[in-house]
Each structure stands twice: as C-alpha cells, then as structure tokens.
C-alpha cells in the first residue's frame, strides 16, 4: 500500500479525478446524440498528433490537441456533406488518423517511441504541468456546459426543433466537437487513445439505465466516472496492473452490475 502515498500515484489520482468529471460529462451528450464513435475517431487523430510531437521533439500533447481540433472541424464539415450518412464522416477521419499515426510511429522508431504508451496510457508519468492543463480543461468544460446547458439539452434531443426555434445549431455542434477534442487530447495520458472512448460512453450507458431525468443523468455519469477512476487506480496500484485498462474494466463491471440488478428487480416485481 506504500504506492498510494507516493507522489506519482497521487498525481495520477488527481489527474484521473479531473478526467473522471469531464469525459463522462461530454460523453452523455455524444451518446444521447448517437455520436458515441466520435470519441474513437478523435482519439485516433490525437494519437497521430502526439506521435508527430514526439517525432519533432516538442509538445506532443499540444500536437494531439491540434490534430483533435482539426479532426473535429473536419467531422462537422463532412457531416454537412453527408447528411443522410453522418457516421461516414467518422469512418473517414478515423481511417486518416490511424494512417497518420502508423506513419509517425514508423518515423519515430529510432527515437525509442513506445506505441503502447499512446494506445493504453501512461498515467503514472503525469507531471504538475499535466495536472494544471487538465484542471484548465476541466474548468473550461464545466463553465461552458453550465452556461449553455439549456441549448445543449435542446439540440441533444431534437436538433431540428432547436434550429427552427432559432438556436445556432452549427455553433453548438462545433462547441461539442471542440470540447470533445479538448477532453480526449488531455485524456490520452490517463487511459490511452484506444481506451479513452470508454470514459466517454460507458458512464453514459450506466446513466441511461438509472437516470429518470436529464439532470439525473449528468450527476450519474460523473459519479460513475469518478468511482471507476478511484477503484481502477487503487486496484492497478496494489496489484501492479495497467491503470488505463483496469479503469475501463471497472467501468464495464459497474455496467454489468447495474444490468444484473435491473434484471433481478424486474423478476422480483
């Protein structure tokens, strides 16, 4: 248990708690709008950016953010071009992200780049600078979502009605995409590019089973996200497991327990 008192573990816990707020909070809007795969798409773009940053030798997380933002704008552009096939934009951008990442990993082979750290996270290497960046993103996400909650609620459940009522739908779509890009790019160190979408979607899946209102769903996704981060890090730290993968497995376990509980209740009643 000495690991819990170590500085690197405490930094990992703080970073995980911050991401446990922002990722599920953004994820509930994505899931309700049937855009769950946007997390995977932007994470692959972010991996490509981070890999390029390591090849260049500077600011890998900044490059990851830039690539995620560019991908989010490209998705919105393609969604307008393929209105009846919105998911096609995600497939195109994801393919491009994977292709670029593979090329940059090849270019960085002589730099001792470890692709696994990008794909599955390296939370124990968080620095105070990383934590300040995560805190800044958390504050930005909370402020924007809190200020625009009503508008986000409207476009989430009926985008056409929101547009007719005069709501700037395009503005809100870009806002959600940019916030998602911010959260994903800053989350890569926590759970990695391949697993970050789990933090976006699985808490939302739990919330859909438990919440009776939109406000309840927001509270539940954050609680589930924080529970999974704390439990996952403690389990990973004590038994020397991969932190990102453990967090995701805890999320899946929580979801399965909720499903089991609902089945038991339905049979009893």
Image (cartoon, rainbow, N blue to C red):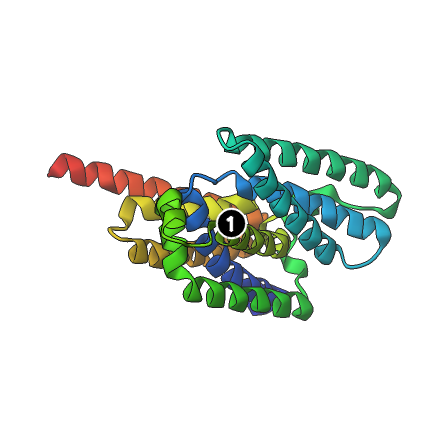
* 19 shown above or below 193: below
Which class describes the residues within 10 Å of circle 1: few (<14), some (14-19), or many (20+)? Answer: few
Residue drawn 64% across the image and 59% down it: 124
The x, y position of residue 107, in whole percent, is 86, 40
Picture mark count: 1
Q: Secondary structure at mark 1?
A: helix
* Residue 98: quarter of image: top right
The x, y position of residue 92, in whole percent, is 63, 32
Answer whether residue 120 is visible to the viewer in this image. no
Residue drawn 62% across the image and 57% down it: 186
Is 26 placed left or right of 51 in the picture? left
Q: Residue furthest left?
A: 269
Name the residue carrying label 1: 170
In front of the other: 245 or 67: 67
* Residue 255: quarter of image: top left
Q: Residue furthest right?
A: 110
Answer whether residue 144 is visible to the viewer in this image. yes
Is 179 placed left or right of 94 in the picture? left
Residue drawn 10% across the image and 39% down it: 269
In front of the other: 110 or 31: 31
The x, y position of residue 146, in whole percent, is 42, 65
Is 170 placed left or right of 54 in the picture? left
* Residue 58: quarter of image: bottom right
Residue drawn 36% across the image and 52% down it: 165
């Amino acid at each position: 248990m000495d690991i819990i008192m170590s500085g690197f573990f405490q930094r990992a816990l703080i970073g995980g708690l911050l991401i446990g707020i922002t990722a599920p909070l953004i994820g509930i809007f994505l899931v309700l709008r049937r855009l769950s795969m946007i997390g995977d798409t932007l994470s692959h773009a972010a991996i490509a950016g981070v890999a390029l940053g390591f090849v260049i030798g500077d600011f890998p997380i900044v490059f990851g953010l830039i690539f995620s933002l560019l991908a989010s704008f490209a998705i919105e552009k393609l969604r307008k071009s393929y209105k009846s096939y919105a998911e096609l934009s995600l497939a195109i951008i994801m393919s491009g992200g994977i292709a670029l990442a593979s090329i940059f990993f090849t270019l960085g082979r002589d730099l001792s780049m470890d692709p696994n750290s990008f794909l599955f996270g390296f939370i124990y290497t968080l620095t105070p600078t990383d934590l300040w960046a995560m805190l800044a993103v958390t504050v930005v996400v909370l402020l924007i979502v809190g200020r625009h909650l009503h508008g986000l609620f409207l476009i989430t459940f009926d985008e056409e009605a929101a547009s007719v009522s005069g709501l700037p739908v395009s503005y809100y779509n870009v806002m959600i995409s940019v916030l998602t890009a911010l959260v994903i790019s800053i989350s890569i160190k926590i759970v990695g590019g391949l697993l970050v979408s789990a933090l976006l979607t699985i808490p939302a899946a739990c919330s859909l089973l438990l919440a009776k209102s939109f406000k309840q769903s927001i509270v539940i996704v954050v609680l589930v996200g924080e529970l999974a981060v704390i439990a996952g890090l403690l389990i990973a730290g004590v038994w020397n497991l991969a932190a990102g993968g453990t967090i995701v497995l805890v999320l899946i376990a929580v979801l399965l327990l909720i499903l089991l509980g609902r089945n038991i209740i339905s049979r009893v009643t």
